[in-house]
Image (cartoon, helix red, strand yellow):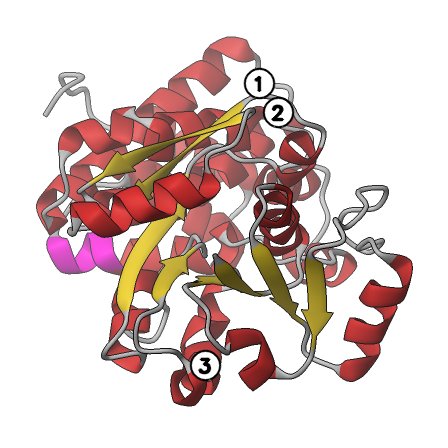
Amino acid sequence: MNVAIIGTGSWGTMLAILLARNGHAARLWARTEEEANLLNAERENRAFLRGVLFPDALIVSADLPRVLAASDFVFVVTPAQRVRDNARHIAPHLPSRAIVVSCAKGIELTTLHSMSAVLAQELSSARVCVLSGPNLAREIAAGLPASSVVASADSAIARAAQSLLMSPTLRVYTHDDVLGVELAGALKNVIAIGAGIVDGLNLGENAKAAFITRGLAEMTRLGIKLGAQAMTFAGLAGLGDLLCTCYSEHSRNHFVGMEIARGRALAEIQKSMRMIAEGVPTAHAARQLAVREQIEMPIVEQVYQVLHAGKKLQDAITDLLAREAKPEIY
């Protein structure tokens, strides 16, 4: 298969490596000739995935038409807020038969649309599916076991992507709940920032377990209201990715929470990071969705208040614990 990967971050690079290892003709798009030449010369992405060498079958190019030419699959692996812009660049060169795989975990701030919806709007003739799950790039690069989920309303598309990605160490499942898989992947980043704060303040394992569990309840509640399946949030894209992101030392969103707990300003933290912590803009988008849909999401609300409204951490904790008594399931 001919496969194009749009995005040279850690996950985009890892997907390109994985697909090349699987025997496919993988072409990774770099934004500049300078970046493409550097990656081709070094045969590794030292900025984001140092020490993981590129297979011979992997080509890096800044020539977008060349990267997309004759592609059977196109993986869009860019920050969520840049997906629409990248899709507009892709559109004139996208082969009509190509399956587009959305890999960004976020919600577009200006429209509150999912990433697959954005891609469908900009690539009107494309067949779009979603890849998500608890997938840390460096672990997959090291050959450690992992699982992913591919979601599409068209089971044939999901199975095709599943077959493309399956490897001896990566097990891929299919799903038909596209919205649920996307919402779970986006919302878990907000909860992970809060979990990082819990860890940074040394609030204990009881608090962290409660925080993650109640965060999952909020994710599920919003998903059901928007038309997703409840069980999706108990699967790989939901609970699986949530646990991974809340506990991993490699999680950017957990890192943001830890640093906020240490007293650093959000702008300073973001400036120091090479990659985007998607939970920061998603906290804003999730809050807007909760308000619009009249859904109670107290954890999302407090994370939003801390990140974007300057609320003090202790005040946010106090407000969460002082809420009126409720049944666990409502």
Q: Residue at x 60, y 65 (%)?
A: 7
Rounded to the nearest angstrom, the CA distance separating label 3 from label 2 is 41 Å
Residue type indicated by callout 1: Leu
Specify start and end residues of the magenta stretch as a single range. 289-293
Rounded to the nearest angstrom, the CA distance separating label 1 from label 3 is 46 Å
Predominant SS along the magenta part: helix
Circle 1 residue: 203
Camera-side residue of 72 and 309: 72
Q: How many dots with numbers?
A: 3
Indicate whether 16 appears above or below 208. Answer: below
Q: Say which of marks 1 and 3 sits in front.
A: 3
Q: Position of residue 303 (x, y in %)?
A: 45, 45
Q: Position of residue 118 (x, y in %)?
A: 30, 71
Circle 3 residue: 90
Name the quadrant containing residue 99. Answer: bottom left
Name the quadrant containing residue 260. Answer: top right
Dots 1, 2 in contact, CB < 8 A? yes
Dot label at residue 144 = none
Q: Residue at x 27, y 72 (%)?
A: 126
